[in-house]
Image (tube, rainbow, N blue to C red):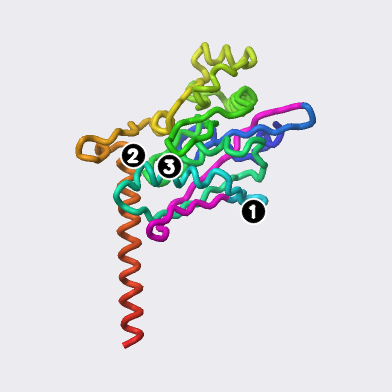
């Protein structure tokens, strides 16, 4: 844990930032396994019509991991695409080049970072995330849940527990919890929190403090909700894409004549 203490791992455990979330990874050191937070940032911009393109890169190694990206685009297309094609590009950057012990255990965190970027709603940095997600937006179990929680708890403790910090975990991992006494005590005293979730909507509400929103009879998400903000942004990106395409066609026409 020296790296965190030296501040070379720039982990925020307080405040809120748009498009940035603390994911959790497990590293093995011989027989010893430990969890560490790893910052994930998302940027979203106009893509090609009908395409959701998501790219991942690790800052230090420049390595890309394609596994699970199709699930993220599948979720976005299914939840918001509906009747209109989307035109979205997103990049996900891992601040650390660690390879995840289990492939998709960061997919929920990645999705939350993308949703935050699209909705322009900040994510609470004191709440870290572990869990994988499927195309239906269900949060699925992951390995190393205890190490991950303890790793983030230790990071927060070093920087100072605020009482607002905690970890989002898959509800299906609750049965695997066997945390060290210090963490159990902190949770009992309300100094640290564990949030079990089953859906993406539950998670984004905890991270942003804003209601996720369910589609109404009019087919729209309620005004001011996370999902409404995301859908509005996706519609805006599609319109911008169309506008740019028309401009490009016009300029081509004028060069031909």
Secondary structure of residue under mark 3: helix
Q: Which mark is residue 62?
A: 1
User: In the rendered structure, are the residues bearing label 2 and label 3 in contact, judged by CB atoms less than 8 Å apart?
Assistant: no
Earlier-in-chain disc, 2 versus 3: 3
Of 135 and 252, nearer the camera is: 135
Q: Is residue 30 above or below residue 66?
A: above
Q: Which mark is residue 75?
A: 3
Q: In this rendering, does residue 158 appear at all?
A: no
- In the image, residue 205 lies at what x, y percent? 39, 30
Q: Is residue 247 above or below residue 11?
A: below
Residue span colored magenta: 32-56
Label 3 crowd (10 A; few <14 / some 14-19 / many >=20): many
Residue for point 35% across, 50% down: 234
- Gap between marks 2 and 3 measured at Cα: 13 Å
Residue for point 66% across, 50% down: 60
Q: Quadrant of residue 200?
A: top left
Secondary structure of residue under mark 1: loop
Membership of 37 in magenta stretch:
yes
């Amino acid at each position: 844990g020296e790296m965190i203490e030296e501040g070379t791992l720039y982990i925020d455990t307080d405040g809120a930032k748009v498009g940035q979330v603390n994911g959790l990874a497990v590293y093995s050191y011989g027989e010893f396994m430990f969890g560490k937070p790893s910052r994930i940032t998302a940027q979203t911009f106009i893509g090609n019509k009908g395409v959701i393109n998501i790219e991942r890169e690790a800052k230090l190694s420049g390595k890309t991991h394609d596994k699970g990206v199709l699930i993220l685009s599948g979720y976005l297309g299914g939840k918001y695409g509906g009747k209109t094609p989307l035109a979205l590009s997103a990049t996900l950057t891992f601040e650390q080049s660690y390879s995840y012990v289990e492939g998709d255990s960061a997919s929920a965190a990645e999705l939350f970072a993308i949703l935050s970027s699209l909705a322009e709603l900040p994510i609470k940095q004191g709440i870290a995330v572990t869990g994988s997600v499927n195309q239906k937006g269900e949060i699925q179990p992951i390995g190393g849940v205890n190490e991950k929680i303890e790793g983030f708890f230790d990071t927060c403790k070093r920087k100072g527990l605020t009482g607002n910090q905690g970890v989002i975990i898959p509800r299906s991992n609750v049965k695997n919890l066997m945390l060290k006494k210090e963490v159990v005590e902190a949770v009992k005293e309300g100094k640290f929190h564990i949030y079990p979730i089953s859906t993406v909507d539950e998670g984004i509400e905890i991270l942003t403090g804003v209601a996720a929103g369910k589609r109404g009879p009019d087919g729209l998400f309620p005004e001011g909700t996370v999902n409404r903000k995301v859908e509005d942004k996706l519609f805006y990106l599609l319109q911008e894409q169309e506008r740019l395409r028309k401009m490009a066609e016009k300029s081509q026409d004028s060069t031909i004549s």
